Image (cartoon, rainbow, N blue to C red):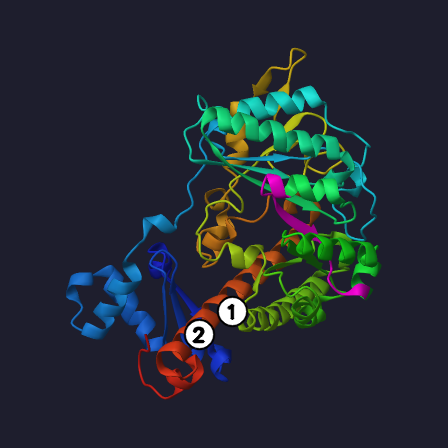
């Protein structure tokens, strides 16, 4: 379907979707307006009428077209994520305590950066004092995420210090805190559980859920499974973060069924497509994987909905909050005591490391921020990429993760763009289908095929 981009310039996107209705792709068009949170199915002749309305809205005499375009043209500014304009705007601090790990995951993006480095505790202290400061920012809540460039729980004293000192500073400055921890789940004991509960830490465990896949890709299934159950038994319900590779892309439904059966109290499961160029030989491998991923993700997602489980990935998480940048950017403290814009780029051996660093501590432990470098990194968004200009998925994608350009060749990045478009289109159709079933008892397909003209 050729476009003059009249509609796209108004952030209204015509998307061919005939295959959803078992018809040629061009026979049915999904009109999607992300800023009004509206979508509808129309016939191709309506697209031209909608373009005409955009060109001369006052001249339209068709009330149906006029009503549809008013609905699509309304914009909700609250849907737009706030843009960071200064390093002092951050309300989230990410801390990577070390570059040490006890696992050897098959797809690990940070393995080459494993230097054995553990962060200087004085730098850790100064970072917390900088971040948790009512003179720096006025906000009701500050978020502190403890992540791995290795396994953070191998530096438990540092993790404990972050929680204790961070909370003490927050209390002194009048902030509420939201602590989170991402771990491989191999290091859990009674003391750790007690401290995590005391500070109400949200725990996410990187875990492939199925024993055969965990042992193949990460190892130590029995240890991690036992520790997850121990957390649950002590009132800490972890989130599970599974990495989807060619080895388990067809097993996503089984993974959710396994959670329902073995870890019934777990409600949040993230199944994220792997970031690893070595997993794919060529563009066709990427394409096949992403098509399989979408198909099985949505099957797993539906199983989750039926059982009160939130199954998500970064593409689905971004769907409801429109973004200019894939992530807002990070104030990420690396094990070397530097500040990175990306939690995936935190070690000198990581591709893109020098370009991603915008802060450091001098010999007197004073934090130095390179404002120009920060701004350059923050400006890596949908506005800086010509290919995003007319893309209907740009507000869910935000121009893509900055780490991808250091991992993938251009042809692979194009496959990721196509995946994002296909995923977003599928999510819109699934949401519409849910709406139709709820309101009429008929599916989207049944409703559209039984109607003529426009179906809103």
Rendered location of residue 126, percent (x, y) = 61, 20
> Is residue 190 inside the magenta stretch?
no
Q: Quadrant of the N terminus?
A: bottom left
Q: Which residue: 81% across, 32% down? A: 115
Specify which label sits upstream in the sequence, 2 or 1. Answer: 1
448 in relation to 337, above or below: below
Quarter-wise, where is residue 263 in the image?
A: bottom right
- Tell whether 332 sits left or right of 372: right
368 in relation to 89, above or below: above
Q: Which residue: 64% across, 31% down? A: 162
Q: Which residue: 60% across, 15% down? A: 366
What residue is shown with label 1?
426
Q: Who is closer to the viewer here, 280 or 241? A: 241
Q: Secondary structure at mark 2?
A: helix
What residue is shown with label 2?
434
Question: For the residues carrying marks 2 and 1, which lies nearer the camera in this image?
Answer: 2
Rendered location of residue 434, percent (x, y) = 44, 74
Q: Which residue: 36% across, 82% down? A: 440
Q: Who is closer to the viewer here, 255 or 223? A: 223
Q: CA distance from mark 2 to mark 1?
A: 12 Å
Q: Is residue 357 visible?
A: no
Q: Is residue 375 visible?
A: yes
Q: Mark 1 packing: few (<14 Cα in 10 Å), some, or many (20+)? A: some
């Amino acid at each position: 379907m050729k476009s003059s981009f009249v509609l796209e310039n108004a952030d209204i996107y015509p998307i061919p979707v005939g295959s959803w209705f078992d018809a040629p792709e061009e026979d049915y068009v999904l009109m999607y307006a992300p800023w009004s949170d509206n979508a509808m199915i129309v016939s191709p002749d309506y697209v031209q009428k909608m373009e005409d309305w955009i060109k001369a809205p006052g001249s339209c005499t068709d009330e149906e077209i006029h009503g549809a375009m008013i609905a699509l043209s309304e914009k909700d500014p609250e849907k737009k994520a706030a843009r960071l304009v200064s390093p002092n705007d951050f309300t989230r601090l990410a801390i990577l305590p070390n570059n040490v790990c006890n696992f050897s995951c098959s797809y690990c993006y940070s393995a080459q950066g494993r230097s054995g480095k553990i962060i200087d505790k004085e730098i850790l202290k100064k970072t917390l004092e900088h971040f948790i400061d009512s003179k720096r920012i006025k906000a009701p809540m500050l978020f502190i995420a403890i992540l791995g460039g290795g396994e953070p729980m191998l530096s438990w004293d540092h993790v404990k210090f972050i929680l204790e000192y961070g909370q003490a500073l927050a209390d002194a400055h009048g902030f509420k805190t939201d602590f989170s921890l991402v771990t491989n789940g191999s290091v859990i004991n009674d003391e750790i559980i007690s401290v995590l509960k005391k500070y109400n830490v949200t725990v996410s465990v990187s875990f492939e859920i199925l024993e055969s896949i965990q042992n193949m890709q990460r190892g130590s299934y029995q240890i991690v499974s036992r520790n997850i159950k121990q957390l649950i038994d002590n009132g800490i319900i972890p989130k599970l973060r599974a990495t989807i590779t060619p080895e388990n892309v067809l097993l996503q439904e089984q993974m959710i069924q396994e959670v329902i059966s073995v870890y019934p109290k777990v409600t949040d499961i993230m199944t994220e497509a792997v970031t690893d160029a070595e997993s794919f030989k060529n563009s066709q491998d990427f394409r096949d994987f992403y098509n399989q991923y979408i198909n099985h993700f949505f099957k797993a997602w539906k199983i989750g909905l039926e059982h009160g489980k939130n199954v998500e990935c970064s593409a689905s998480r971004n769907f409801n909050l429109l973004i200019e940048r894939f992530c807002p950017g990070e104030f990420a403290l690396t094990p070397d005591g530097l500040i990175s814009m990306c939690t995936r780029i935190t070690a000198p051996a990581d591709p893109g490391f020098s370009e991603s660093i915008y802060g450091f501590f001098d010999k007197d432990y004073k934090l130095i921020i390179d404002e120009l470098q920060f701004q350059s990194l923050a400006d890596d968004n949908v506005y800086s990429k010509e290919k995003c200009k007319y893309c209907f998925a740009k507000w869910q994608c935000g121009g893509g993760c900055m780490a991808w350009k250091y991992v993938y060749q251009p042809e692979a990045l194009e496959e990721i763009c196509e995946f994002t478009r296909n995923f977003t289109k599928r999510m819109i159709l699934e949401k519409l289908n849910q709406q139709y079933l709820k309101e009429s008892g008929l599916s989207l397909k049944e409703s559209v095929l039984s109607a003529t003209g426009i179906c809103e």
